[in-house]
Amino acid sequence: MPALRKIVVTAAVLASTVITAYPSSAQPLTPSSAPSSTHAALGTGSWHAYWEADWKGADTTFSGNTGDCHYVGNNWNDHIRSARADGANTKVELWDNFDCTGGSITIDGSGYHSIGDWVSAYRVTS
């Protein structure tokens, strides 16, 4: 019986132990790394991309949850020449690389009327 008591006491001690894991960097947690239950509460935003400068030519609408990185797809990768966010309060980062790294610009409702051939991904920020 003493062995069983020792196991029960050890189990009780371990059950009350709290393990805290800290991020591996000093960076704050981003919305995309938050638990999925929080993800549903995040806002969404959309923006228009155009094949030509000055909001002309073929166009499409992209949308996403705030903080999520999205690849623009093979058809639009490096072909976006102008863009504007939908709504006065919407802001969207346009990124050089498919994984939202590299150089970026931020567009809002006033948009960019002339963008070089480099946009590969986007992230809605507000």
Image (tube, rainbow, N blue to C red):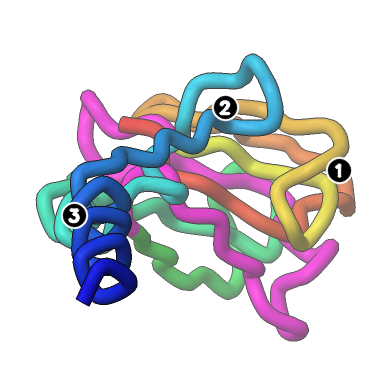
Q: Residue at x 42, y 44 (%)?
A: 67
Q: Residue at x 22, y 26 (%)?
A: 88
Asked if marks 1 and 3 touch (Cβ < 8 Å), the reply is no
Q: Which residue lies furthest to the front in this view?
A: 1
Q: Percent x, y for residue 13?
A: 25, 46
In the image, 86: left or right of 92? left
Q: Percent x, y for residue 97?
A: 83, 53
Q: Is residue 77 magenta?
A: yes
- How far is mark 3 from mark 2, CA to CA? 53 Å
For the residues carrying marks 1 and 2, which lies nearer the camera in this image? 2
Q: Does the magenta stretch include residue 82?
A: yes
Sequence-first disc among 3 and 2 = 3
Decide: few, some or many residues near mark 3? Use Cα within 10 Å; few <14, some 14-19, many ≥20.
few
Residue at the spot of label 1: 116
Residue at the spot of label 3: 12
**Residues drawn in magenta:** 65-91
Helix, strand or loop at label 1? It is loop
- How far is mark 1 from mark 3, CA to CA? 63 Å
**Residue 74 placement: quadrant:** bottom right
Query: Mark 2: which amino acid?
Result: Thr
Helix, strand or loop at label 2? It is strand
Query: Mark 3: which amino acid?
Result: Ala
Residue at the spot of label 2: 106
In the image, 7: left or right of 93? left
Query: Mark 1: which amino acid?
Result: Gly
